[in-house]
Image (tube, rainbow, N blue to C red):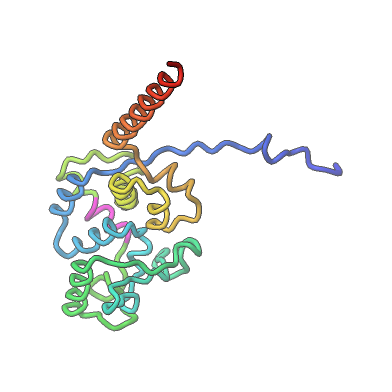
Amino acid sequence: MIERSPVRSKLHKPECSREEKPALTSLQVRLLLDQVEPEHKLFLLLIVVTGLRLSEALALRWQDLDESTGTLSITHRMWRGRLGPPETRKSRARIRLAYELVEALVHLREVSGFNAPEDFVFCKADGLPLDPDFLRKEVLYPAMDRVGIKRGLRTYGFHILRHTAASLLHERTHDLKGVQGFLRHSQIGTTSDIYVHKTATVAREASELLASELEKAVVVESKLIN
């Protein structure tokens, strides 16, 4: 009934508070992998090293692995037991794997009873894709409990491995744009607000850098005054 909407995009834009998600330390990751059964260890390791989403890892098929180039193509995700398109267009990508990880995947293909191109890389005894609830409740959570990692409500699922990969990468490189590419995020704000965790080491280095620059500025200013 009104000619024009009174809502102004900048003035009335709702605020969305984003909470920083928890991440594990590199030591916790190593301890966690040590507590996982051998048949599931490579699955968790792949997620930690590549930052894959759980749905993407479940959807991997042998045709996605290119042994000659050492790359893994992310073309699908698993949603409620069915293959579907990736979460976003940015999610579809080809990622390069470490040589050791390629070797481990090739060995798994050789010993697997389901190694045709269209077969799932990680599957159950009948060849069907792994169940995410089973992995969460029977594999990940018990391993965390044995290590002594206290789990928070809805914050310590498989996605914490993705958060951890991003945080450890950022801690080593301080390259936020690189982390965005690693996680295949469409918006860098998602990377900076949720996935990158400021560790004590990074904070200390930043404060030392600022202190050094301020000290230089004071010296320059005193010279100009004199």
Report the magenta residues as a range: 132-140
In the picture, residue 126 is in which quadrant? bottom left
- Looking at this view, is 96 or 124 the one in front? 96
Compared with 26, 102 (above or below) is below
Where is residue 16 shown, x and y percent of the image? 54, 38
Where is residue 84 shown, x and y percent of the image? 46, 69
- Looking at this view, is 132 or 62 the one in front? 62
Compared with 137, 152 (above or below) is above
Where is residue 87 shown, x and y percent of the image? 47, 61
- Looking at this view, is 195 or 40 the one in front? 195
Q: Residue at x 24, y 65 (%)?
A: 98
Which quarter of the rendering shows the C terminus?
A: top left
Q: In this rendering, would 118 be left or right of 15?
A: left
Q: Residue at x 14, y 52 (%)?
A: 35
Which quarter of the rendering shows the N terminus?
A: top right
- Looking at this view, is 18 or 1 the one in front? 18
Magenta span contains residue 72: no
Q: Is the magenta region chiefly helix, strand or loop?
A: helix
